[in-house]
Structure formats: structure tokens, C-alpha cells
Amino acid sequence: MKMMFKAALLAATPFAVAAGIVPVAVAQAAGNVGVADVQGAIQKTNAFTTAMTQMKTTYAAPIAAFDARSKALQASLQPEIVAFQAAQKAPNANQATLQTQYAAIQQKQQAAQAELQRLSAPIARAQAYVEEQIGAKLDAAIKTAMTAKGITLVVAPQAAISYVPSVDLTDAIVAELNKSVPTASITPPTGWAPNGQGAPGNSAAPQGR
């Protein structure tokens, strides 16, 4: 189950750019600079954590299928990987043979990744929808948090060499998002796709769980 949620997390659309988040070079010229992990803020909200709990039940079958197939694919590939590693260490190893072995393993790994991605698609799509609903209120939450702390510019934590906790707006943004988005649906509308690329006319309001 953990592997499924990790895969879904990687596939979900990040909200890494929002109003108020600026390049560090620009921030250097400002006095009141804050930091914020906007993606982390979304994932710390009550709406997100509740949705993830609900998804464990609603998507129990895809999660189980993903986990089982992932283990099976890993088990089938492991002997070939071990054999390849042993062949590499052999004296006077034949490089052409090694290259053939490596290419075969790589091809199987790519096929396995594609299969697992298909299996994880339903939950990845649902998680992306949850994040999009919360992310729709992110800009306003950032601005409110900035105003409350007298911050004029915000950078991502990784863009700052060092900072004191008092300039970290992440928790303040979480608090604002908890107020503006108390819940999020885990059921995307028909035709919905991440980044607003769903079919025209299908941008319906969040459906019930």
C-alpha cells in the first residue's frame, strides 16, 4: 500500500509555482523574505490527509493489485540481475554478452515500470484531483499568510541557505488552506485530467465521495 501511495505522489501534479514565490536572486534585494514549502503545505492539510485515508479504502483493489504485481515483477527480475552481476565479476567477462544481458534486463524493467504505471493510474489521478482542489486556493492562502507576517517575498526552502523558523510560512499556509478547503473529493469528474486537460465541458464541481 505504501508503494502505491508513493507512486501516486510522484505522479501527482505539484503546485511548485504560485504567486509570491520568487527566484532567490530577486529575493536578495528584499528585506522581508519568507520561505514556504507549498507542495508540503498542500499535503499537510486536513483535506489531503483525510482524502488519503479514504483512498486506502476506496482504491483498496488497485492498491492490492499494484503491490502484488510489483512484488511479482521484482521477483522475476531479481535472478537475472544477480546473474548479470555475477557475470560482470567473472574473469575475462565477455563485454558483448554483458551488454546483451544488460539490454534485456533494462527492457524488462521499462516494461515493468509501464505496467505498474498503468496499475497506479486510478489512484494517481484521484490524488492529483485532490491536490488540484486544494491548490486552487493556494495563491490566496499564500497572500494571506504573507500579509499576516509582513512578508513581501517568498522563496522555496531549498533556495535559502539558512533561515530562522519564524520566516517559514508553511504552517500558516496550511492553516489558511484548512479554512478555505476543509474537504476534498477523491472522485474526479468524468473526463477530468491533471493540469486542466480534461475534455471540454467536464470541469464540473467536485463530486461527492
Image (spheres, helix red, strand yellow):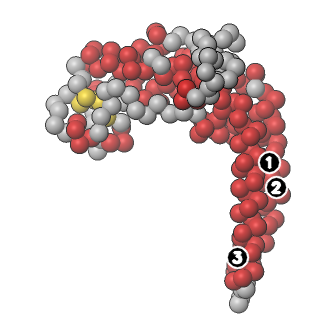
Q: Amino acid at mark 3?
A: Gln
For the residue carrying disc 1, how many other residues have a C-alpha within 10 Å: few (<14), some (14-19), or many (20+)?
Answer: few
Look at mark 3 in the image and give the residue it sits on: 99
Residue 145 sits in quarter: top left
Please tell me which residue is depicted at 64% across the width and 35% down the height of the picture.
Answer: 8
- Of badges 3 and 1, nearer the viewer stands 3
- Of badges 2 and 3, nearer the viewer stands 3
Q: What is the CA distance from the residue labelled 1 to the residue labelled 2?
A: 6 Å
Return the x and y of residue 141 as percentages of the image width and height. 39, 17
Which is more toward the observer, 188 or 41? 188
Task: Give the mark, 3 or 1, whose residue is nearer the N terminus.
Answer: 1
Return the x and y of residue 105 as percentages of the image width and height. 75, 65
- Tell me, yes or no, if residue 146 can be seen here: yes
Return the x and y of residue 26 as percentages of the image width and height. 22, 38
Look at mark 1 in the image and give the residue it sits on: 71
Please tell me which residue is depicted at 58% across the width and 33% down the height of the picture.
Answer: 12
Which is more toward the observer, 64 or 125? 125
Q: Identify the secondary structure beneath mark 3.
A: helix
Q: What is the CA distance from the residue labelled 3 to the residue labelled 1?
A: 26 Å
Q: Identify the secondary structure beneath mark 1.
A: helix
Please tell me which residue is depicted at 70% across the width and 12% down the height of the picture.
Answer: 209
Looking at the image, how many numbered discs can be counted on the residues? 3
Task: Tell me, for residue 75, which label it has, or none.
Answer: 2
Are the two marked residues, 1 and 2, in contact with CB atoms closer than 8 angstroms?
A: yes
Left or right: residue 168 versus residue 208 is: left
Quadrant for the N terminus, please.
top right
Return the x and y of residue 197 as percentages of the image width and height. 58, 29
Q: What is the CA distance from the residue labelled 2 to the residue labelled 3?
A: 22 Å
